Image (spheres, helix red, strand yellow):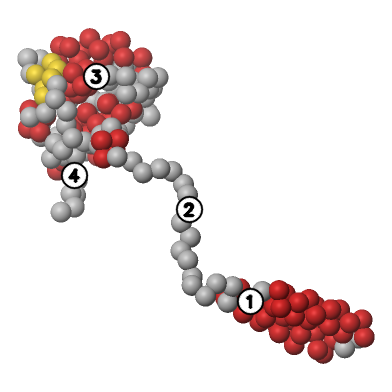
């Protein structure tokens, strides 16, 4: 390595002398030779190439990963045990959700939870009046989302806005049941759990394309 560095130094010295002597025609050749020498030095620095392994993070045990594997799939995968009724959800909604979504889920200012099909209701004769009353709330969660499990998933991971992941599973089932009730998909006597939630037929499913 020392010999190669010495050669590179001599070549640099030669370039400097050449420039001072005005022999610009040799500059390109000398620089090319210099770069070739440096490249050869780097390639031969180690006869056996080694893979670089960044020392970032630490291995996770499967039990640690389970704590973060909370995504709820349309087929019910990862749905937890628990249950909740529409009546229980109504009480929770008024204390945890109404401040952002409105008393009936349509007033906002946050996302509209219930109501007609929003952007899809171009033939709705009352659409103009509805847009005038709530101009920024055209799209409804209840009419667009294709699966009730998605409502459960979103509430559990992100709601309420000021304290996400603060609700237990029973409370999330109850709030999901109440939102479904606001969309006329559940009656007041219904109790929602990991089995009954899969039986809900969401209006948005017909508009969705599900990849196999």
Q: Quick one: quadrant of the N terminus?
A: bottom right
Residue 1 against residue 137 in the figure, above or below:
below
Q: Secondary structure at mark 3?
A: loop
Q: Are marks 1 and 3 in contact (CB under 8 Å)?
A: no
Q: Where on the picture, by quarter, is residue 98?
A: top left
Instruction: Indicate left or right for 38 with 200 as reference.
Output: right
Where residue 189 sits: x, y (%)? 7, 14
Is 172 or 182 nearer to us in this picture? 172
Whole-angstrom CA distance, mark 4 to mark 2, is 45 Å
Instruction: Identify the residue shown where x is 46% and y is 56%.
Output: 53
Between label 1 and label 4, give the one nearer the viewer.
1
The residue that disc 3 covers is 168
First in sequence: mark 1 vs mark 2: 1
Instruction: Indicate left or right for 149 with 31 as reference.
Output: left
Instruction: Identify the residue shown where x is 81% and y is 89%.
Output: 26
Residue at the outermost front position: 2
Whole-angstrom CA distance, mark 2 to mark 3, is 39 Å
């Amino acid at each position: 390595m020392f010999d190669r560095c010495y050669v590179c130094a001599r070549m640099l010295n030669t370039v400097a002398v050449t420039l001072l002597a005005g022999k610009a025609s040799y500059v390109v050749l000398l620089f090319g030779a210099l770069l070739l020498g440096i490249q050869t030095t780097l390639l031969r620095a180690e006869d056996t190439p080694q893979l670089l392994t960044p020392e970032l993070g630490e291995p996770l045990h499967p039990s640690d990963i389970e704590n973060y594997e909370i995504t709820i799939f349309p087929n019910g995968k990862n749905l937890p045990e628990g249950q909740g009724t529409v009546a229980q959800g109504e009480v929770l909604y008024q204390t945890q959700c109404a401040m952002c979504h409105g008393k009936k889920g349509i007033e906002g200012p946050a996302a509209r939870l219930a109501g007609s099909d929003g952007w899809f209701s171009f033939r709705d004769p009352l659409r103009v009046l509805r847009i005038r009353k709530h101009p920024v709330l055209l799209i409804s969660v209840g009419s667009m989302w294709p699966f009730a499990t998605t409502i459960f998933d979103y509430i559990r991971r992100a709601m309420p806005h000021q304290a996400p992941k603060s609700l237990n599973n029973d409370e999330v089932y109850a709030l999901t049941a109440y939102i479904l009730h606001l969309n006329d998909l559940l009656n007041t006597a219904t109790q929602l759990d990991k089995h009954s939630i899969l039986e809900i037929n969401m209006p948005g499913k017909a508009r969705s394309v599900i990849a196999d």
